[in-house]
Amino acid sequence: MIDFRTETFLSVCRNMSYTKAAAELNITQPAVSQHISYLEDNYSAKLFEYKSRTLRLTEAGEELYRAALTMRHDEGKLREKIKNLNNGSKSLIFGATRTIGDFDLPPKLARYLKNNPGTTIKIRLDNTKRLLEMLDTGEIDFALIEGYFAKSDYGYRAYSSEPFAAVAAPGLCPEECALEQLLNMTLIVRENGSGSRRILERFLTERNSTISDFKNVVEINSIHAIKSLAAAGCGLTFLYKSAAAAELKSGKLVEVKIKYMNLKHDYSFVWRKGSIYEDEYIEIMRELT
């Protein structure tokens, strides 16, 4: 079990301040110092250091932080499993990015529910950044994401590779062109933290461009709204082709072929690295995907 000194360590990591950690935990600052000193003695390593008057984790501190997050998550998972044993139920608590949750997951989840009747499921749909934060705090057990993540912090499996494309209403812009020809248009884009936005940002950086280079930018955190605006001729957007499959088939949207753009990106199944429940998560992934 995670003891109170490790909880103090995690609080200091969240706040990067002994004073703020003391206030968060409702203990004194000397108590915080004592807890950190105990851990440093226990692991024979400094966990924090000051650089330019800013508190930072040492390399050893970073290692303990990653392990402590996983241990705290696993303890919460253990409590949930024991509770389920007592009432004879089974539960899944996980997250998915909006593209996956809205377009890829439903038929697979339906199959899983038919094969596992009586399972209680809680799903959080959010962007990649927020889902990784939920993994770190133990709010969810695993996540299905399409964005980038630190592979040093998470266990993962890639379960599909999906094409990423520019789309717009028919006739709004050339169906084959250079990126520079599109910069005088309105770009409809997901919010910061979105995996699909990060993929777009990386592509633009490789072409010496940024989102702000477009004439106008409309930011919205709903894929359905983005597609509706694009189909109404309000601007150009970039998304996974699977998310716009129905609109591309019906002709409401068309793919814009951009020179030098041939993007694919993995959908990934992600959990806290080192979790004792890794094998269980991989089995769930096989059933879901």
Image: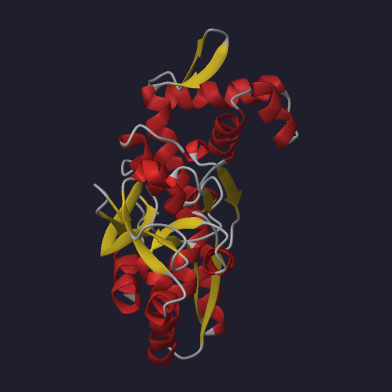
Location of the C terminus (image quadrant): bottom left
Q: Residue at x 60, y 35 (%)?
A: 11
Query: Horizontal and vertical percent for residue 60?
Result: 37, 25
Q: Work out whether 241 lies above or below 235.
A: below
The answer to which of 282 and 144 lies nearer the viewer is: 144
Residue shown at 58% from the left, 64% from the top: 229
Q: Quadrant of residue 32?
A: top right
Vertical placement of residue 16 versus 218, above or below: above
- Which x, y percent locates residue 215? 54, 41
64 or 227, which is in the foreground? 227
| Residue for point 50% across, 20% down | 56
Q: Residue furthest top?
A: 52
x then y, percent, for residue 133: 52, 48
Of residues 161 and 59, the one nearer the viewer is 161
Left or right of 167 in this view: 23:
right
Q: Name above or below for residue 214 compared with residue 62.
A: below
Q: Is residue 38 left or right of residue 151?
A: right
Q: Position of residue 25 (x, y in %)?
A: 70, 36
Q: Is residue 81 visible?
A: yes
The answer to whether residue 153 shows anywhere in this view is no
